[in-house]
Image: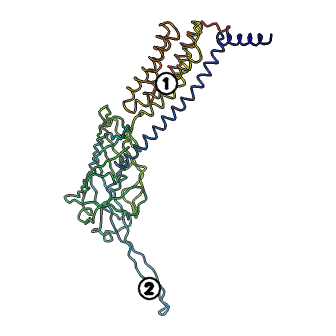
């Protein structure tokens, strides 16, 4: 009698599980939560591959060069200063004066600095990974005005004119690809590295040999010109030390980001899929430093401006963003099957839900592995079509009709297409995503209005 009662209760529970809407909802929700476990492993896999990519890119970049920051040319002019000391003589009971001579330096910026920058970007590959790098040629020209240091308290006769030199500071010493010579009027001067200079920034210093500056800088304007060729990564910047500084930059890079304190002129800026062309003009009134500095070269890195060569969302970033929608894809797909099951009275076993969920998670492993050997769009299409076809055919065996599997295939195609659009968008991703989710909710509410929830 008791066994019969237990059997009866088990049959009632099994019947409730099969027929109750509430039971099916709880089962679907539980399976969605369970499938978050493989999704978390997939996210870990994406992060692991992304870290591996960063390691390879850093290794490539270290051998290629560094980011480019140029600070110069700066005229380094030595001058004499004097100190007097008084010494008391015990024998004569008198003081005598002793004068000591010291050599200090004044650093003078040019009156006008013009730069023409040509950048050729390309990619370097190692295995499945690649890094974006560039080679740039920077042509500089400008002039100095006659030197007058009276305002600094320096007399002309105290200046050591024949020991002057020119200084250029850069962040990318190892990336320089050609000898550098500065032309002052009609004479050229070479550069050497100077590691003994008291340097108050992270920049390396190039210094020319001695220049007899009296004939060049004392009474007349002095024109200068020089060129620098770099292998570099990430960005190119210039510090506007000219009283008037201009820079024009041309590149085949299609995704520039203009950085620093000064933006290029909107009237001349052009950006297309083939590259960009931009120009800047900075006046002395736009920055808070003078043209002459005593004793040391100031650290003016914060005044730099230029271009960052952005690598737009790469394959691993796109895969990661796609995987973040995994919960949405699984939840909405299960919701479609739940609505079909509820409206058509077709029974779907929890194991079949689980197989469908695992097929949806396989999309992300296919996406990651294929995108390492191809572009993201092709990988996304192959992975998406594979999963959609698999689930559609599997649904045909479950639902026994053709119209429901066809509807599921179309729904999954629309969902994956919607997610791909969101991934590609930058500024409008949140807006488009919110509108899309609102429309999905509206459709679900419309379809589920005919369900009799009183049978739960």
Q: Position of residue 71 (x, y in %)?
A: 35, 53
Residue drawn at (48%, 17%), measured in percent from left and top? 391
| Residue 285 in view, yes or no | yes
Q: Nearer the viewer, residue 3 or 260?
A: 3
2 or 1: tag closer to the N-terminus:
2
Q: Is residue 378 left or right of residue 400?
A: left
Q: Position of residue 198 (x, y in %)?
A: 41, 63
Residue 109 location, quadrant: bottom left
Q: Is residue 29 left or right of residue 312?
A: right
Q: Residue furthest right?
A: 1
Q: Which mark is residue 431?
A: 1
Q: Nearer the viewer, residue 164 or 178?
A: 178
Q: Is residue 34 above or below residue 235?
A: above
Residue drawn at (30%, 65%), measured in percent from left and top? 164
* Label 2: which secondary element: strand
Residue drawn at (38%, 37%), measured in percent from left and top? 128
Q: Is residue 143 left or right of residue 375?
A: left
Q: Position of residue 393 (x, y in %)?
A: 46, 14
Q: Residue furthest bottom?
A: 91
| Residue 446 in view, yes or no | no
The quarter of the picture where the C terminus appears is top right
Q: Position of residue 399 (x, y in %)?
A: 52, 9
Q: Which mark is residue 96?
A: 2
Task: State the separation of the CA atoms marked 2 and 1.
Answer: 84 Å
The quarter of the picture where the N terminus appears is top right
């Amino acid at each position: 009698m008791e066994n019969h009662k237990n059997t009866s209760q088990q049959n009632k529970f099994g019947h409730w599980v099969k027929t109750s809407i509430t039971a099916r909802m709880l089962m679907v929700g539980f399976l969605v939560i369970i499938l978050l476990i493989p999704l978390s492993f997939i996210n870990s896999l994406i992060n692991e591959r992304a870290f591996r990519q960063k390691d390879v890119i850093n290794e490539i970049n270290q051998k290629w060069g560094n980011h480019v920051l140029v600070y110069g040319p700066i005229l380094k002019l030595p001058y004499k200063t004097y100190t007097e000391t008084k010494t008391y003589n015990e024998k004569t009971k008198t003081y005598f004066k002793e004068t000591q001579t010291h050599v200090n330096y004044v650093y003078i910026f040019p009156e006008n600095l013009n730069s023409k920058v040509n950048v050729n970007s390309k990619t370097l590959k190692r295995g499945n990974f690649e890094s974006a790098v560039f080679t740039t040629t920077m042509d500089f020209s400008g002039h100095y005005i006659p030197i007058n240091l009276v305002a600094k308290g320096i007399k002309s006769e105290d200046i050591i004119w024949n020991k002057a030199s020119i200084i250029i500071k850069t962040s990318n010493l190892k990336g320089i690809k050609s000898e550098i010579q500065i032309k002052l009027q009609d004479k050229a001067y070479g550069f050497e590295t100077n590691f003994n200079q008291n340097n108050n920034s992270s920049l390396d210093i190039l210094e020319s040999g001695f220049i007899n500056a009296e004939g060049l800088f004392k009474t007349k304007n002095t024109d200068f010109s020089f060129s620098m060729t770099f292998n570099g990564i990430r960005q190119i910047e210039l510090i506007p030390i000219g009283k008037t500084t201009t820079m024009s930059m041309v590149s085949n890079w299609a995704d520039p980001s203009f950085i620093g304190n000064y933006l290029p002129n909107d009237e001349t800026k052009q950006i297309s899929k083939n590259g960009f062309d931009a120009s800047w003009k900075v006046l002395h009134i736009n920055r808070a430093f003078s043209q002459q500095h005593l004793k040391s070269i100031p650290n003016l890195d914060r005044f730099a401006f230029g271009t960052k060569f952005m690598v737009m969302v790469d394959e691993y970033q796109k895969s990661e963003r796609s995987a973040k929608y995994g919960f949405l894809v699984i939840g909405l797909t299960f919701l479609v099957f739940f609505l079909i099951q509820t409206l058509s009275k077709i029974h779907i076993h929890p194991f079949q839900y689980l197989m469908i969920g695992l097929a949806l998670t396989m999309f992300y492993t296919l996406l990651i592995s294929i995108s390492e050997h191809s572009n993201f769009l092709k990988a996304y299409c192959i992975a998406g079509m594979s999963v959609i076809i698999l689930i559609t055919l599997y649904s045909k065996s479950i639902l026994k009709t053709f119209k429901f599997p066809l509807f599921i295939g179309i729904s999954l195609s629309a969902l994956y297409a919607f997610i791909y659009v969101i991934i590609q968008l930058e500024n409008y991703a949140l807006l488009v995503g919110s509108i899309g989710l609102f429309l999905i909710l509206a459709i679900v509410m419309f379809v589920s209005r005919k369900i009799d929830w009183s049978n739960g």
